[in-house]
Image (cartoon, grey):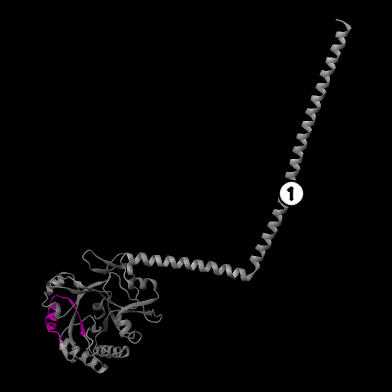
Amino acid sequence: MGKGSEEKMNKTVTRRNKKKQLSSLISNIIFCLIALTALTGCIVLVLQNYSLQNEGREVMSRLEEHELEFIYTQEDLDAYLAENALREREDERNSFLEEIKRRVSSGESTVSLLRSFFPQDVVVYADGGYSFFPISETLKKHEYVYENFVKQENEEIIYVDEERNIRSVKGIDVSKHQGEIEWDKVAEDGVSYAFIRAGYRGSSEGKLIEDEFFVDNMEGAAENDVDIGIYFYTQAMTPKEAKEEAEFVIELIEPYDVDYPVVLDLEETESASARTAEMTKEEFTKVAIAFCETIKEAGYTPMIYGNLKTFMIMLDLEQIEDYEKWFAYYDETVYFPYAFNIWQYSSKGSIAGIKGDVDLNICMKDYTQENE
């Protein structure tokens, strides 16, 4: 190789070295720029994070101040409680209305609804309206367990104790409306006692009238060992008339053995022109007391028969507290908080030996033992 060729080769090598150096320099510059960009981004993120943390602390500080102000400001607390109470009342109201809707849709009566909503009152439906009588804390209450009144397959009701032993006695009440009765069949049907109507006072002229089947029923019951009680349908307007009614009954029953009470039958008259239609509670109460006292003086056990209207509207319960009660209420469960010994639970009973309907009763007291 000659000298010229050698110089040419040296120049070529020198150019290549310069290109490599330039390329390396450019690469370093690019890497530096990338690193600088990344560093700048990190710094920006750090600054943003720091700024956000400061803003967060500031917001939390303001929230804490607001929360503290809310908790410790009585006015705000009262408003909060009032709002919640209003919301709860609204929820209760809606629930209450839904309950009414459900029960009415199922066919439940208005009076049944009212009695369930007002358990502290005796609710009476009479004369087209509803009356509410607060249950007295001073009057004697009965101690019957409602679940222990059991309706049997034959539709008759009995009262049982906790061991399911029967603690009631089956009875009926009869008058001329039952016509001629076959008392032997009545006794065979398990009837232990019968209240027999002695008579009644006319609702217009006020005459005392003996029941036309009184003697037949008294003799038929006695001959078949059916214990006897007596009732008289009153239309007395004064204590004097009530005493007259009692004396009329005492004379009629004198020849017979009467173990069960002698009862004043006091009911609302269906006729607006009846002689007792305009009587007050006080007047009815005086009549009842006069009758019962006269019966008591004659040695018999006095009793008052009636329904919810009789005892809650027509009579003053406090004044007749000492007299025994026979309560009429036609349902499977009796509705009356006060003391009573006999429950007339149906006017549509069926008893062997009696044509047509007859009143059914259960008695929770053994009057035959009391009079021995």
Q: How many marks?
A: 1
Q: Residue at x 52, y 68 (%)?
A: 85
Q: Is residue 358 left or right of residue 59?
A: left
Residue 371, horizontal then vertical, whole percent = 24, 81
Residue that mark 1 sits on: 50
Residue 270 falls left or right of residue 94: left
Which residue is farthest bottom? Answer: 240
The answer to whether residue 174 shows anywhere in this view is: yes
Q: Observer-nearest residue: 21 or 220?
A: 21
Residue positioned most to the right: 3
In the picture shown, does residue 144 fall above or below 46? below
Residue 294 found in image quarter: bottom left
Could you say which is closer to the camera, residue 270 or residue 75? 75
Q: Nearer the viewer, residue 56 or 360?
A: 56
Element type at mark 1: helix
In the displayed structure, 224 sits above or below 282; it is above
Q: Quadrant of the C terminus?
A: bottom left
Q: Position of residue 136 (x, y in %)?
A: 39, 80
Residue 162 visible in the shown view = no
Amino acid under disc 1: Tyr
Quadrant that contains the N terminus: top right
Q: Which residues are magenta?
A: 210-232
Comparing 290 with 30, the one in front is 30
How many residues crowd around disc 1 within 10 Å: few (fewer than 14), some, or many (20 or more)? Answer: few
Q: Left or right of 68: which side holds 323?
A: left
Magenta segment includes 188: no
x, y percentage for residue 346? Answer: 23, 73
Residue 211 placement (x, y as % from top left) = 14, 84
Q: Is residue 226 magenta?
A: yes
